Image (cartoon, grey):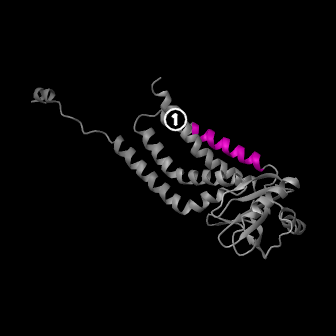
């Protein structure tokens, strides 16, 4: 009974780490196949959410997160950005909030920003996000997640969590120092991606793709995983080396 809390703790750690990775993988799979933005939606959304305010410019950009270019059919893969003014105009956030509530936009919520908080709203397959920087206020229009996105994300999370919990439960039941060694190595390997993923989710929920976190970290994480794997193999191999047999002095005396 004394070791059972340790087994549970290891299983929960595995569920958290692998569940986060599964969430990212599920959101990538579920976010594929988004429809391209329509010209009508691009024209109408800015005037509807920021009535009476004219943009100073507009650009179409390809999605880019954590050093990864998104495909055109990924969630957030393409977007149109409207620029307003030459500096942050925080009053636009309140204007957008009121317009979104009165015109039936859903999933409205604040977006934390450096200068001041922005705003986000969704409707009719569109996600519109207002952000403020030191140089300008920008209204970004991109595709919302397609049908089945949440189901795929939840499924990936549950499968990853179940696999991680089962793996860490089995490892926890092994003789020492296997649980400590494997738990430490796997945690070190997966913690950076998990921490960045949850930080991103806290700020954006699932409105922005989180799987680029793992792909962006891959050039660093893959060599780290290989090094940690090598360290683990070396440590376990050394512990399994047979001890040098001790000579029995009594037996030696009789032999003489």
Decide if residue 192 is on the left or right side of residue 31: left
Decide if residue 95 is on the left or right side of residue 28: right
* Residue 123, horizontal then vertical, whole percent: 85, 55
Look at the image and give the residue range highlighted in magenta: 149-165
Please identify the residue farthest to the front as the structure is shown: 91
Residue receiving disc 1 = 9
How many numbered marks, from 0 up? 1
Give above or below for 102 relative to 14. below
Decide if residue 219 is on the left or right side of residue 94: left
Give above or below for 47 relative to 21. below
Please identify the residue farthest to the right as the structure is shown: 40
Decide if residue 118 is on the left or right side of residue 36: left
Q: Nearer the viewer, residue 248 or 151?
A: 151
Secondary structure type for disc 1: helix
Q: Residues within 10 Å of mark 1 (few under 14, many from 20)?
A: some
* Residue 67, horizontal then vertical, whole percent: 61, 66
Q: Residue 134: which quarter of the image?
A: bottom right
Q: Nearer the viewer, residue 120 or 153?
A: 120
């Amino acid at each position: 009974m004394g070791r059972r809390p340790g087994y549970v703790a290891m299983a929960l750690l595995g569920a958290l780490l692998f569940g986060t990775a599964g969430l990212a993988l599920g959101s990538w799979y579920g976010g594929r196949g988004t429809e391209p933005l329509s010209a009508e939606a691009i024209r109408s959304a800015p005037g509807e959410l920021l009535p009476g305010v004219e943009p100073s410019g507009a650009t179409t950009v390809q999605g880019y997160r954590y050093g990864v270019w998104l495909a055109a059919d990924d969630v957030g893969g393409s977007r149109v950005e409207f620029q307003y003014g030459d500096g942050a105009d925080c009053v636009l956030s309140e204007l957008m909030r009121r317009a979104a509530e009165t015109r039936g936009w859903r999933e409205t919520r604040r977006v934390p920003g450096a200068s001041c908080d922005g705003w986000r709203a969704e409707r009719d397959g569109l996600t519109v996000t207002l952000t403020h920087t030191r140089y300008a206020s920008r209204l970004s229009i991109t595709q919302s997640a397609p049908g089945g996105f949440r189901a795929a994300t939840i499924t990936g999370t549950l499968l990853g969590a179940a696999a991680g919990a089962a793996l860490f439960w089995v490892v926890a039941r092994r003789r020492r120092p296997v649980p400590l060694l494997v738990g430490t190595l796997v945690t070190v390997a997966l913690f950076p991606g998990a921490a960045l993923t949850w930080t991103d989710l806290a700020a954006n929920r699932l409105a922005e793709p989180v799987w680029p976190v793992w792909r962006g970290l891959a050039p660093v994480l893959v060599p780290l995983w290989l090094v940690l794997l090598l360290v683990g193999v070396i440590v376990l191999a050394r512990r399994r080396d047979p001890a040098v047999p001790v000579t029995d002095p009594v037996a030696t005396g009789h032999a003489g």
